[in-house]
Amino acid sequence: MTNSSTPGAGPRQADVRSAGAWLLRHGLGDGPPTPLLTARLAVRRRARLLGSVLLAALYIAAALAQATDRLATAAFGELWPYRPTLVLVLSTLIIGLVLARTLLDAWVRRVDRQAGAALARRVAHPVQLGWRTLLGWRYAVLLIGTFAGAFALGVSALTLDEGTVRYAAVVLLVAVAGVGLGAALQLRELLARPVVAEDEVSLTADVIMRIEDARDSNAPSVFLGLPVVLLLGSAPGWWNAAALTFMVLGLAAVIAVQARTPSCAATARHVVGVG
């Protein structure tokens, strides 16, 4: 890959090494990473790390809120008046997660725009990338299936008579709808995002990054985890069994899809026309 420079301080050595490892992993390691590619990969790595931390924090906080409510209910029974507060807390956590992921996506886009503005020359790809290229039909079916399963679990819990379960079911439905809308908007933005590349190699890298972004932002982990985190234990036994079965089957489907779907690098080379 040809060397180019971007304004400002030079990239960190750790980011350069990580970018070099990324190039080797995707079969593009015929030269040192450019500052442009290093900056784009660094922001994506940090955004995904922060996203994973936020998701883990959501699960822990939701579990703690549920546990606190159950302990208080066991101690005070019907005298415990703060169940609506639990809904508010869980809703705030969900909104915070969706907002944080939106801000992380905006951070990645801003770095991409800055990198593109610093290019001395810019190549364009003649083929418009569609959702089949960025996501693939297997990932699309997996995403729709897990979304539908999580939503169905929320609706079924909403029909129960237990007040705590119904409160949590409302939160689950709001969360599933919010995360699903966020994933759809992210995919739409990726389809419209301009190419940031200066040669054939950086063009291939750009397509690989967009495919990775699409698959990462549409991962079904939230849909698989939220029903269990929000309602497991407080719902009836049949619902708990259904939620656990849904999660196990979903994880098996994720493994199968990842094994059968062509890699991001192979898909990008096919699109760009590189052997």
Image: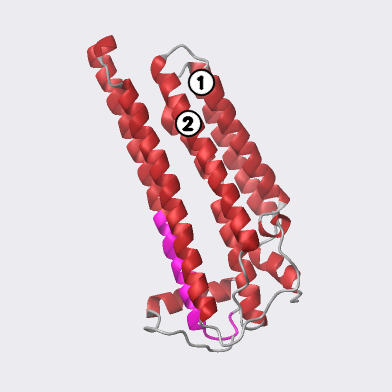
Residue for point 65% across, 74% down = 204
Q: For this view, does 82 lie left or right of residue 108?
A: left
**For this view, does 170 lie left or right of residue 216?**
left
Spot occupied by residue 188 in the image (x, y as percentages of width and height): 62, 54
Q: Earlier in the sequence, mark 1 or mark 2?
A: 1
Can the viewer see residue 44?
no
Colour option used: secondary structure
Residue highlighted by disc 2: 172
Do callouts 1 and 2 mark residues in contact (Cβ within 8 Å)? Answer: yes
Q: Please check the rendered image and state whether residue 143 is part of the magenta-colored stretch, yes or no.
A: no
Q: Amino acid at mark 1?
A: Ala
234 or 182: nearer the viewer = 182
Q: Amino acid at mark 2?
A: Leu
Quarter of the image where the C terminus is located? bottom right
Question: Is residue 216 positioned above or below 60 on the image?
Answer: below
Q: Residue shown at 60%/32% (left/top)? A: 149
> Residue placed at 28% from the left, 17% from the top?
73
Q: Where on the picture, by quarter, is residue 13?
A: bottom left
Label 1, label 2: how far apart the Cα atoms are: 9 Å
Q: Secondary structure at mark 1?
A: helix
Q: Is residue 204 among the parts visible in the rendering?
A: yes
Return the residue at label 1. 157
What residue is shown at x 48% (from left), y 82% (from top)? 35
Q: Observer-nearest residue: 206 or 85? A: 85
